[in-house]
Amino acid sequence: MMQPKNQPSPSSQTEESEPKASAPENPSSDASQASSFFTRADWRTALFTGLFVFMGYLLSMAPDVTLEDSGELSVGSFYAGVPHPPGYPVWTLYSWLFTQLPISNIAFRVALSSAFAGAAACALLALMVSRGTRLMMDGMASVKGLDPGLKGWISRVSAWVAGMLMGFNGFMWSQAVIVEVYTLSVLSLMGVLACLMHWVYVQERKRYLYLAFFLFGICFNNHQTLIVAAMGIQVAIAAVNLRLGRDLFLGNSLVYILGLMAKWYGMLTAFDENIPLFVIYNAVGISSLAAFAWAWSRTQEIMTEWKVVLLLGLAWLVGASFYFYMPLASSTNPPMNWGYPRTWDGFVHAFSRGQYERANPTSSVLRFIQQMALYFKGLSSEFSAVMAFVGLLPLIVWKKIARREKAWLIGLGGIFFCLAVILMILLNPPPDRQSQDLNRVFFTSSHVVVALFAGYGVALLAGLLSAQYQRYRMVAICAGSVALAFALFGKLALERVHPLDQFTAWYGIALTLAFLIVFGRSRDRAPTYAILAVLSLAPFYSVLSHWWENEQRGHLFGYWFGHDMFTPPFEVYPEMDEGAILFGGTDPGRFNPTYMIFCESFLPSSKKPRDPDFDRRDVYLITQNALADGTYLDYIR
C-alpha cells in the first residue's frame, strides 16, 4: 500500500498502531492515522493461505487440454485472440502472459493462470478477514479486552479458514484446475471488495474507491453477470456515506428514466417480448428512486458529491474499455476470432452475446422458491452445514457489533443479494441436474460473501468463548452436539462406499468429537488455542469432500479425444489424410481438434512428450453448426 509522508515505516508498526473502533459513529476516525490499512501480519496470513491453496491446485491440475471450452480458450489465449462471446479481453491478455512460460503444453500453462488467479483470490479473502476480524473484535465491548496476541491468532485462524473454504469450495476448485475464465472473475471481484473495504474504514483515501470501480469495470470484462453486483456495491457505499450513496442512487434513477424514454421511442428493444426482464428493470429503477428519496429526506441535500460520482463512473468506463481490445485482436485474424469483432456488427454480436439466448427471468414464484432451495442446498454442500451456520454468527450477535462493522456487513449482504437472488432470477436455471451443473459456476462469486461471513463467524466464535467462556460454554457444547449429529447422519447416509468418502465421514465425526472433548476437559478456563487448532482443521473436511469431483491430476481424456481424431492409438481406423477438411460439431468436437491444430502442432517436441512428432497444421477445420452465422463466414473466408 502507498504510505503518506511523515508516517512511521512498516517495520516500526505494531498491532497497537492499527485503527480502533472506539468511535464507531465515524468509520474512518482513527484508521486514517495508520500508514497502512492492512498490516504485515495480514499480508503474511494472506500469503500463507494463498500459497497453500495454490499448491493444492497444482497437485490436482489437469496435465493437458480437457473438454468443454478448454481447447477454444487455450487457442484464444495462445494467440491473444478473441474467444467465445463476450470475448473476455482481460482474461485473454492475462492468460497470454502464462503461455510465454517455457513449461509443458499450452493448456497446462493457461490452466496455471486459472490456479494462480484462484489462489490469489483466496489470499485477498484471507487478507480481508484477517484485518476485518480484528477491527470487529476491537469494536465489541465483550471481546475488546482480549490479549492482543490472542486476537492476532484468532484473526489468523479465521482468515485461514475463510480462504481455505473458498479455495476448496467445489465451485471454485473445479474451475481452478482447468482452462477457464471464472477464477479471474472471482479475483477481480475480490479486488473490488478489498478496495471497497479499505475505503469504508479510511474514507479520506478516495483513491481506493476509484480503484474499486475501475476493478468493477474489469469485472464486467471478465464476466458480464458480475454487473448485477452494482446495486449491492452502492448499498455498501450508502451504508457508510449516505450523501455519496444518495447521489449514486440519483444517477441510477436518471439512467432508469432515460432507459424508459429510449424504450418509448423504440431505441431500446431489449425488453420487447420479454416482460419479466422489463419487470426487473422497473423494480431496480423504482428501488433506486425510492432509495434516493429516502437518502434525500435524511440529508436534505442533493448533488453535493457529483464530482465523485462522475469520477467513479469514469473509473468504471476505463476498466470496461478493455473490450475495445477485441477489434484490435480481430484485425490480426488470429485462429480464434469469434464473432469477427473487427467489424461493428461483429463487435456488437460478440459484446452482446448475440449467439446465446436472451435473458428469460423467472416469472413463477414457486419456481423461484425451488431454485433458491437448490441454491442453498448447494451452498451447504460446498461449505458444509456446520460452517454455513458459523457464517450466521455475525447476524446472531448483531447487537454486539459496532456501527462501523454493521455498515460493512450490510454492504456485503447487499452484494450477496445481488449475486445470488437477483442473478438467480435473471438466469432462471432449469431444475434438472445437467442444468444445475452448467449454471453453478455463475454463482461462485456469491460464495465469496459466504466465505467472508464464515471467517467473521469463526472469529466471533473463538473471541466470545475466550472472553466469556462460562456464559457460552454450554451453548458451544450444545452446538457441537448438533454438529456431531449431522456428522453421524452424514456417515449413515453415504450413497457411495468409496474409501475416500468413508474417511471423509470419519474425519467429520472426529473433528466434532475433538471440539466437544476440548470443552469437556476444560470447565473453568477457555481453551482458546485448542479451539483454534480444531477450527483450523475444519477446511480439510471441505478438501476431502470435494477432492474426487474436482481433481484432474493425470486425466488425459481431453488430450486423447483431440489427438486420436488425427492419429489413432490402435489400428482401428486410418490416420487423417494430409490436407483434410475436418467438420466439427459439438464443443469438444471442434475445440479439441482446434487446440491440436493451432497449439499442439506449434510446440517444440520437448513440450509434447506424448507424441513429439505431432504436427497437423495442414488440416482445415470448419465448425459445422456455425456455417449459418455471418460473422463466422467472415472469419473463415
Image (spheres, rainbow, N blue to C red):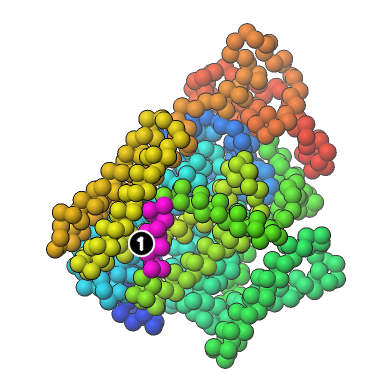
Q: Residue furthest bottom?
A: 300
Q: Which residue corresponds to the image point at 39% horizontal and 82% vertical from the top-left? A: 26
Q: Indicate left or right for 220 with 606 as reference.
A: right
Q: Residue at x 48, y 74 (%)?
A: 206
**Residue 294 in magenta stretch:** no
Instruction: Report the residue at 31% width, 65% height from top.
Output: 460
Residue 246 in the image: above or below residue 398: below
Residue 417's place in the image compared with 438, above or below, is below
| Quarter of the figure with the C terminus | top right
Residue pictured at 71% horizontal, 55% vertical: 359
* 525 and 496: which is toward the camera: 496
Residue 484 makes an appearance in the image: yes
Q: Nearer the viewer, residue 614 or 191?
A: 191
Left or right of 61? Residue 90 is right
Which stretch is magenta?
Answer: 385-396
Where is residue 576 shown, x and y percent of the image?
A: 69, 16
Find residue 80 and report its image quarter: top right
Residue on which disc 1 sits: 457
At label 1, counting other C-alpha atoms closer than 10 Å, the crowd grade (few under 14, some 14-19, many 20 or more) is many
Q: Is residue 103 visible?
A: no
Q: Secondary structure at mark 1?
A: helix
